[in-house]
Image (cartoon, helix red, strand yellow):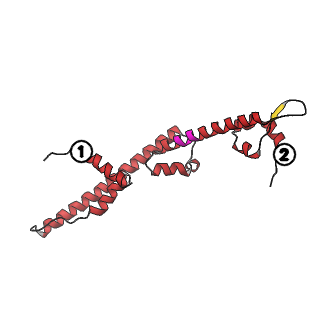
């Protein structure tokens, strides 16, 4: 019989977890809950040996659980420390729910937040380019003959602070035509 190595065992466990739609930690917890309390075949053993085996098994199970909890706590502490180093000005209240969802799905907090920031920057750049194009297309002549862009309330709400500052005069003129509820 061919002996399998640890890498093959891990690959199989990851494949099984993936096929069930579970993260590896969820899969291992499920297996432990399902099969961890299987009775030992104690036929022919003295009762004191059976008790000792059961106690040893329970102690080993509890120790594994404590080790996992300690490892998770250590990893969490390290991740929070790393996050604070990378994003010192961000408080937990500033982190959107989508980032916490990514963390629950296995991403690190730093990576999930960095991805969020990058996607927000991309959206802001896109909105700025759209606003710039719309501003140029919607320019109207003022009474002094110069052209100023005409902005809608929705366009201004999507603008970055920089865009608002650079288009302030045009925004003020455009506000005269807005309808406020």
Which residue is situated farthest in the bottom direction here?
47
Residue 3 at x, y = what percent? 16, 45
Please tell me the numbered disc located at residue 143: none
In the image: residue 106, left or right of residue 97: left
In the image: residue 9, left or right of residue 156: left
Q: Based on the displayed image, in which of its 4 quarters is residue 32 positioned? A: bottom left
Residue 132 at x, y = what percent? 71, 34
Mark 2 highlights which residue?
Answer: 177
**Residue at the spot x=14%, y=68% of the render?**
48
Query: Could you tell me which quadrant the C terminus lies in?
Result: bottom right
Q: Based on the displayed image, in which of its 4 quarters is residue 56 positioned? A: bottom left
Which residue is situated farthest in the front direction here?
137
Camera-side residue of 42 and 21: 21
Precedes in sequence: disc 2 or disc 1: 1
| Marks 2/1: CA–CA distance | 71 Å
- Residue 118 drawn in magenta: yes
Residue 86 at x, y = what percent? 51, 38
Mark 1 highlights which residue?
Answer: 6
- Residue 28 drawn in magenta: no
Considering the numbered disc 1 on the image, is that residue within a helix, a strand or a loop? helix
| Predominant SS along the magenta part | helix
């Amino acid at each position: 019989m061919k002996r399998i190595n640890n890498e093959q065992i891990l690959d199989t466990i990851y494949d099984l977890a993936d096929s069930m739609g579970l993260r590896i930690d969820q899969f291992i917890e499920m297996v432990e809950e399902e099969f961890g309390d299987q009775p030992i075949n104690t036929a022919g053993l003295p009762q004191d040996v059976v008790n000792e085996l059961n106690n040893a098994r329970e102690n080993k199970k509890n120790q594994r659980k404590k080790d996992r909890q300690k490892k998770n706590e250590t990893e969490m502490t390290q991740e929070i420390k790393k996050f604070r180093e990378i994003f010192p000005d961000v408080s937990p209240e500033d982190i959107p729910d989508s980032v916490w969802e990514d963390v629950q799905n296995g991403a690190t907090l730093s990576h999930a937040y960095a991805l969020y920031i990058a996607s927000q920057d991309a959206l802001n750049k896109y909105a700025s380019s759209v606003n710039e194009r719309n501003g140029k297309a919607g320019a109207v002549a003022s009474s002094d003959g110069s052209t100023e862009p005409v902005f809608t309330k929705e366009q201004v709400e999507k603008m970055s602070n920089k865009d608002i500052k650079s288009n302030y005069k045009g925004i003020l003129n455009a506000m005269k035509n807005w309808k406020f509820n």
